[in-house]
Amino acid sequence: MKKFQIAMPQTIEQVTSILPAEKGTYYLLAGGTDLLGEIKDEIIEPEAVVDLKTIPNLSYIKKENDGVRIGALTTVAELAEDPLIKQDYPGLHEAAISVATPQLRNVGTVGGNLCQRPRCWYYRDSQTECLKKGGAKCFAYRGRNKYHAIFGGGLCYFVHPSDLAPALISLDAEISIATPKKEKTIPLADFFTLPKVNVRQENILNSNEVLKEIKIPPAKAGEKSTYYKFKERGAWDFAVVSAALKANVSRGVFKDIKIVSGGVAPIPWRLEKIEKTIKGKKVTEDLIKKAAREALKDAKPLKENEYKKELLEVILSRAVLSLA
Ligand SMILES: Cc1cc2nc3c(=O)[nH]c(=O)nc-3n(C[C@H](O)[C@H](O)[C@H](O)COP(=O)(O)OP(=O)(O)OC[C@H]3O[C@@H](n4cnc5c(N)ncnc54)[C@H](O)[C@@H]3O)c2cc1C
């Protein structure tokens, strides 16, 4: 591992002023569960690491009139254990407890989880110079692509690894981003970008910007949410396919529903076609399966991951029926 400098700022303003405006070799460090792995595996070679943990007051879960605010340095464990999150946003609680292991949840942060880098095995192999690392091609496209994207691919076919992202987007979360000028607030759904926008990064953050806070609107009366995650094994694992749902159901009729899937695309993938079919109806297993099959016609599986279509259909129908 090459030596690097470490900065320990006291304020977020110091962070945005330390970070260079051009993408380079400065990296933000939160819990380090992803970043340190990337450094040790020589996927990245930082010149400097800027530690966010030395900034006070970036870890909190606060209930306010306009919703719940979550500081970027809140750990995944704190989110998972919070009684308010459990009660008002069960889908987010389920997503949080599905992340990694207790040790990783104790250290990994919510901000780091949303900004974590792809798990694609070609990207994580230091000897492979794929598109994401400035190379000329995506090796997964014609190579081993069992875990890769069935939606939104093109150029690069990784899947976004975060469990929290689909759950938070299904809850209409917004995020605040600290910049060298004014703080900006955007829907979390607009944070993630497809490879065709910029194949080297997964979100809209400029190199001198920091994800500061996540805000979830108050849960409405009658609103339910859930998170279904299919893993290849019982122990810790990333989602092969997942589905986050928020719905308003009255006597089995879906007045409203939002579905965001994980593990299927380079960004959390909204399934609007299925939402439209279900909205206003009393859902049966047949209806949801038919809706899922229709929506899955848009999928473009690679050689080894056609199976994800069937998996998605199954977890979607289980998740929708559980809310019904
Ligand atoms: C063995 C293992 C299993 C895992 N399993 C899962 C899983 O099942 N589900 C899942 O969702 N995740 C999983 N993860 C990923 C883990 O959840 C995330 O690594 C963790 O939440 C990241 O948080 P962190 O604070 O450690 O991030 P760090 O490692 O510190 O940072 C991760 C990335 O985000 C950037 N970053 C961090 N904070 C900010 C910020 N506030 N603003 C801008 N950029 C920022 C860093 O520069 C870095 O690129 C797993 C990781 C490991 C090692």
Image (cartoon, rainbow, N blue to C red):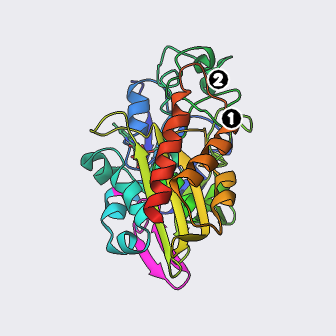
Q: x, y percentage for residue 280?
A: 65, 69
Q: Which mark is residue 195?
A: 1
User: Which of the two residues, 15 or 35, is positioned nearer the viewer here?
Assistant: 35
Residue 96, label in figure: none
Give the residue type that dot 1 points to: Pro
Which of the 4 quarters of the picture holds residue 52? bottom left
- 120 within the magenta span: no
Residue span colored magenta:
57-76
Q: Ligand 1 lies in which image quarter?
A: top left
Label 2 packing within 10 angstroms: few (<14), some (14-19), many (20+): some
> Does any portion of residue 155 appear in the rendered image?
yes
Depth check, front residue: 109 or 22: 109
Magenta stretch encompasses residue 61:
yes
Label 2, on which residue?
A: 131
At a point 48% along the width and 38% down the height, the residue shown is: 311
The answer to whether residue 179 is seen in the rendering is: no
Element on which disc 1 rests: loop
Q: Between 185 and 100, which is closer to the camera in this rendering?
A: 100
Q: Give the structural element (helix, strand or loop) at label 2.
A: helix
Q: Residue at x 27, y 38 (%)?
A: 235
Q: Residue at x 44, y 55 (%)?
A: 227
State the image coordinates of residue 26 (x, y, percent, origin top left). Answer: 54, 39
Mark 1 in CB contact with mark 2 (< 8 angstroms): yes
Q: Is residue 27 above or below residue 39?
A: below
Q: Position of residue 6 (x, y in %)?
A: 43, 42
